[in-house]
Image (cartoon, coloured by chain):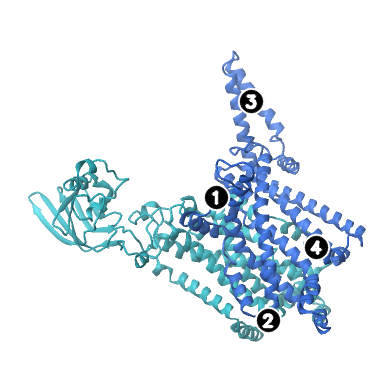
Chain colours: A blue, B cyan
């Protein structure tokens, strides 16, 4: 990797790279805005039903608090109606559909996801954005830990496989790749919990830490202990695919002419592999690894539920169970933003590692 | 492409495919699943499992959370298997204005763990009165039930002896056991069948020794009016173990559920993969063929779809729109089609430059003719390979959406079975036969298509073949 970085030093063609970065980031923002508009269009009806119900609730509460005072019932009724129209105009519910969708999309783009109906954050707030932001780091910790271990094992195994293709190790691990290919991660999680938490009681069945949470260093150890089983599950499922892809990329590179010529020049095989082969194979491998992280987060997100890991995936589950539409939609918008930023960062790294990309502008 | 060409290329492909062992294994597994689907009606012990999966009444005669029958082979204590006793000895007597009908069932009990219940089922009408007693191998007789029915419009008699004969069984137990111990028992502490099928002696409620032998269950019914009748009597014994895969805590037969799930998994997987890969391939080819502005616009649209986090969007759409299985398949297709586009586009870019494309354009062939006649057929092998790879994905996505309880409630899928298992705490209670079979089915089916897909991939990309 260090060889790589020195080869494509930042100085060389940095202005071209800067232009590439700008183009890619703007493109990402554009896609994000388009998607948010599509979401608003799709889910406007449901969101409005929820907002209307919330307004009804507010007005009813206000009317109730007034009913003890001296005001006559007809005045109270009038007040209620006035408040309702007021709130309707605040949330633009009295405007035509097109304008409502636009308003909703602009709100989402400025992270104003509204109030939740049931779910509360740890501090008791019912702002959707607070609830979502609380869940984000937990998801990132779980999946990035798993992915780092996953990529290290996958890379090592993939290179081993590529060195001796068709031999026992290569074949057996390839078969294992296919065996776990269609296995849902949450199902393996269920089995792991059943085995390691209820039959052989060595791991906790879920959660972020023990209750009550220990303090200081013990808290760190305790968190690691709770992290082990979900990470183990993800790694067991993940590294096969990683090693299989690494193998294919490395094997493809090893069949290039320049490798043959390097071998012919008598360069030791180790140097051919790591010096020549890996230098070429690195950009696609890095991309693949990061893409794997992204798809893993997006595809296995529900997996958190099984381990009661209160991240974003678990938030989907909870908001579906509680029918909390604002949280559901806010979570989706935030996930989409994270996902697109991931894709943009991926492209930037790839462009950085492979200079051909930034010149052509296209892959 | 002529038909004979097609046949040739298929047979060539088959020759290559045959050499890849894993591909053959995958194909065999796929065939096995297909055979199971075809023979589903004869395999299902509960033929209505498909449309009455969530109907509690349909499953009421099954034991609750019973392990599979074959677990008996691995256990030193034999659990009673589930059984249905039919064709009893019948005695019909006129007693003045009354009629008496008597059924005697014989039950050979040769197990260590008693059944969960004994259920008497019959058809009847009017207001029959039913007395049930059981004669044990040691000569003791327990009068279990004495009940008058007023059936009205209903014509079904169902008596659960394991639930409704508490006092009678406790009376029997107190003949041998200390009254102070018996009086403290209730249904949450002891199963009545445990006492019925145990040796009668001091301490029988604590340490139970099974009493093996033939039990005679005698049902005596008194029919007072001419309109009263009773018939088709049978005894259902929900054992301690059940069937091939046991039952869940809603008493459903899991084997029926898993078998009924095969066709849905295949349907979801194959339909989603075929539609989305076809759309993606055609989209990629058109984009590459047209080039220029059209290519730019189409790739922009593609980029937007690629940037969608698939599973979260599917979950939210399912939660908001409450889709049926067909809508869910449609929704998955809406996002899955992007998969092959990039590869197909770059392949089609190369094909576009071939001289025969130029030639047919010079001959005045229409765009659609060139695309569908000359370009798309070349990508068919690739399409099949990616279809095989997409099938497991679609199955897993449906299962995941179902896990959240958002699946189509009119069908049974493996994901829904697992969802119920998760929400009922099957893991916590160690009901492994509820968790493992459906998930394993998903995994094995995914594996079958992965084997097929990877084998095709190997043939199509010879560079990755072993040296």
Q: Mark 3 points at which residue?
A: A81
Q: Name the residue under label 4.
A: A350
Q: Residue at x 59, y 21 (%)?
A: A65
- Cα distance in 3D space between marks 2 and 1: 43 Å
Mark 1 or mark 3: whose residue is earlier in sequence: 3
Are the two marked residues, 3 and 2, in contact with CB atoms closer than 8 angstroms?
no
Parent chain of label 3: A
- Cα distance in 3D space between marks 2 and 4: 28 Å
Of circles 1 and 4, the one toward us is 1
Q: Mark 1 points at which residue?
A: A206
- Cα distance in 3D space between marks 3 and 2: 77 Å
Q: Mark 2 points at which residue?
A: B466
Quarter in which the C terminus of chain A is drawn = bottom right
Parent chain of label 1: A
Are the two marked residues, 1 and 3, in contact with CB atoms closer than 8 angstroms?
no
Are the two marked residues, 2 and 4, in contact with CB atoms closer than 8 angstroms?
no
Of circles 2 and 1, the one toward us is 1
Taking the image as drawn, is residue B64 in sight?
yes
Residue lying farthest front? A217
**Residue A301 at x, y = what percent?**
62, 54
In this rendering, the count of numbered labels is 4
């Amino acid at each position: 990797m260090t060889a790589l970085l020195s080869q494509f030093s930042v100085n060389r063609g940095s202005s071209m790279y800067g232009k590439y970065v700008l183009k890619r980031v703007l493109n990402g923002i554009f896609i994000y805005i388009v998607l948010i508009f599509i979401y608003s269009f799709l889910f406007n009806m449901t969101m409005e039903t929820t907002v209307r119900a919330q307004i009804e609730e507010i007005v009813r509460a206000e009317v109730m608090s007034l009913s003890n005072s001296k005001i006559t019932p007809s005045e109270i009724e009038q007040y209620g109606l006035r408040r309702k129209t007021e709130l309707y105009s605040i949330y633009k519910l009295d405007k035509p559909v097109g304008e409502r969708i636009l308003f909703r999309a602009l709100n989402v783009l400025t992270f104003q996801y509204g109030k939740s109906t049931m779910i509360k954050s740890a501090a008791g707030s019912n702002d959707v954005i607070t609830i979502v932001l609380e869940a984000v780091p937990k998801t990132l910790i779980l999946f990035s830990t798993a992915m780092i271990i996953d990529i290290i094992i996958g890379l090592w195994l993939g290179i081993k496989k590529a060195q001796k293709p068709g031999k026992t190790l290569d074949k057996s691990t390839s078969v294992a790749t296919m065996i776990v290919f269609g296995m849902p991660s949450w199902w393996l999680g269920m089995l792991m919990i059943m085995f390691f938490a209820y039959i052989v009681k060595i791991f906790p069945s879920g959660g972020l830490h023990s209750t009550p949470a220990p303090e200081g260093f013990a808290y760190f150890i305790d968190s690691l202990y709770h992290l082990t089983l979900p990470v183990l599950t993800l790694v067991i499922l993940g590294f096969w695919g990683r090693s299989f892809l690494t193998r294919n990329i490395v094997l493809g590179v090893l069949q290039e002419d320049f490798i043959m010529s390097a071998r012919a020049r008598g360069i030791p095989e180790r140097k051919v592999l790591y010096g020549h082969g890996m230098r070429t194979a690195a950009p696609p491998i890095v991309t693949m690894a990061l893409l794997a992280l992204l798809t893993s987060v997006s595809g296995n997100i529900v997996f958190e539920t099984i381990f009661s890991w209160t991240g974003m995936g678990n938030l989907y589950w909870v908001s579906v169970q509680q029918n909390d539409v604002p949280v559901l939609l806010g979570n989706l918008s935030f996930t989409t933003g994270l996902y697109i930023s991931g894709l943009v960062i991926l492209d930037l790294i790839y462009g950085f590692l492979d200079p051909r990309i930034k010149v052509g502008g296209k892959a | 492409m002529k038909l004979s060409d097609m046949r040739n290329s298929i047979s060539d492909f088959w020759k290559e495919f045959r050499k890849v062992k894993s591909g053959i294994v995958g194909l065999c597994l796929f065939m096995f699943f297909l055979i199971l689907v075809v023979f589903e009606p004869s395999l299902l012990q509960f033929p209505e499992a498909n449309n009455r999966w969530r109907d509690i009444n349909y499953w009421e005669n099954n034991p609750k959370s019973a392990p599979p029958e074959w677990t008996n082979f691995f256990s030193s204590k034999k659990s009673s298997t589930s059984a249905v006793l039919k064709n009893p000895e019948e005695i019909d007597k006129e007693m003045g204005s009354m009629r008496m009908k008597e059924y005697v069932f014989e039950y050979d009990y040769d197990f260590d763990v008693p059944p969960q219940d004994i259920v008497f089922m019959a058809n009847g009408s009017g207001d029959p009165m039913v007395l049930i007693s059981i004669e044990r191998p040691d000569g003791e007789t327990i009068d279990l039930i004495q009940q008058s029915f007023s059936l009205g419009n209903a014509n079904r008699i169902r008596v659960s002896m394991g639930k409704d004969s508490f006092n009678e069984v406790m009376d029997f137990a107190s003949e041998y056991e200390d009254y102070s111990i018996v009086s403290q028992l209730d249904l949450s502490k002891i199963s009545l069948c445990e006492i019925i099928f145990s040796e009668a002696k001091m301490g029988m409620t604590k340490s139970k020794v099974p009493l093996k032998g033939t039990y005679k269950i005698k049902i005596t019914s008194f029919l007072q009016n001419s309109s009263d009748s009773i018939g088709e009597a049978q005894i259902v014994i929900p054992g301690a173990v059940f069937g091939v895969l046991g039952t869940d805590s809603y008493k459903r037969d899991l084997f029926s559920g898993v078998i009924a799930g095969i066709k849905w998994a295949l349907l979801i997987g194959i339909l989603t993969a075929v539609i989305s890969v076809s759309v993606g391939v055609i989209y990629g080819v058109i984009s590459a063929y047209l080039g220029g502005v059209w290519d730019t616009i189409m790739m922009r649209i593609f980029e937007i779809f690629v940037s969608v986090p698939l599973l979260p969007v599917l979950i939210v759409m399912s939660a908001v729109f409450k889709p049926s299985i067909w809508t869910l398949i449609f929704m998955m297709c809406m996002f899955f089609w992007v998969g092959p586009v990039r590869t197909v586009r770059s392949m089609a870019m190369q094909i576009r430059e071939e001289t025969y494309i130029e030639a047919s354009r010079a001959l005045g062939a229409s765009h659609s003719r060139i695309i569908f006649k000359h370009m798309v057929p070349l990508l068919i092998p690739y399409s099949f390979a990616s279809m095989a790879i997409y099938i497991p994905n679609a199955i897993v996505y449906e299962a995941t959406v179902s896990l959240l309880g958002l699946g189509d409630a009119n069908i049974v899928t493996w994901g829904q079975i697992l969802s119920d298992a998760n929400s009922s705490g099957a893991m916590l209670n160690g009901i492994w036969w509820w968790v493992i079979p459906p998930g394993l089915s998903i995994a094995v089916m995914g594996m079958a298509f992965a084997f097929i897909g990877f084998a095709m991939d190997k043939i199509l990309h010879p560079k990755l073949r072993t040296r």
